[in-house]
Amino acid sequence: MSRTVYLLNGPNLNLLGKREPHIYGHETLADVEAQCRTLAAELDFSIEFRQSNVEFQIIDWIHEARENAAAIVINPGAFTHTSIAIMDALNARKCPVFEVHISNVHQRESFRHHSYVSLAATGVMAGFGTHGYSLALRHVAQLLGKGAANASGINKDRQGFRVMKEAAETT
Ligand code: CA2
């Protein structure tokens, strides 16, 4: 029974907190990771928190998550808007996928309005700042339940809604 959540971050997110704070805020990616680790410990699951500027690396991590993860939370950075390969990798996964954007991409340039990743995602969150990662983790915790829903239950329902409903009914 997996209680591991993969949090994957795409290109340039290593610069978080160091440039463009008016768009992305002042927190660094290390700050976000620390917050996610603290929250995950509270919620009783483990996380794999990773960042890469390289498309194939992110695809390889999605393949790894396919075997190991209860859920994937992904901020694919600019690959969101370009990468059919990441979308294809996500479509082959067995668990729910939540797409997170720090900024409200729909309020920005038109090229950010389309997301290939959204076509594969269970849910999408944009414009909540770095708090979006915590919100996604809390939602995953609700899906997983307190040990109530196991990974195979999640796997049978990629949307996660049935599992969430069952978890709600048993608490
Ligand atoms: O809002 C988001 O989270 C984005 O995924 C961030 C991407 C952008 O290409 C997407 O359209 C929306 C950019 C990540 C780059 O992050 C930086 C952070 C600080 C300084 C420069 C880039």
Image (cartoon, helix red, strand yellow):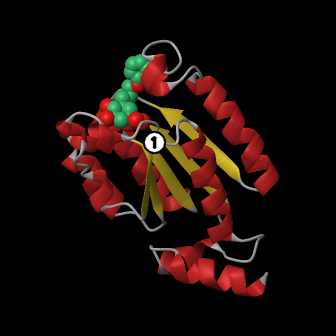
Identity of the residue drawn at 45% across and 59% down: 97
Residue bearing mark 1: 127
* Residue 149 on image: x %, y %: 67, 76
Q: Residue at image x 56%, y 36%?
A: 130
Query: Where does residue 96 sit, x and y in percent of width and height?
Result: 48, 65
Residue occupying image coordinates x 45% and y 74%: 159
Q: Nearer the viewer, residue 152 or 141?
A: 141
**Location of residue 59 with respect to 22 vertically, above or below:** below
**What secondary structure is marked by label 1?**
loop
Residue 37 image point, x, y percent: 72, 40
Q: Is residue 31 visible?
A: yes
Q: Is residue 42 left or right of residue 15?
A: right
* Farthest-out residue, front: 107
Give the quadrant of ligand 1: top left
Q: Nearer the viewer, residue 63 or 100?
A: 100
- Residue name at image x 79 percent, y 48 percent: 41
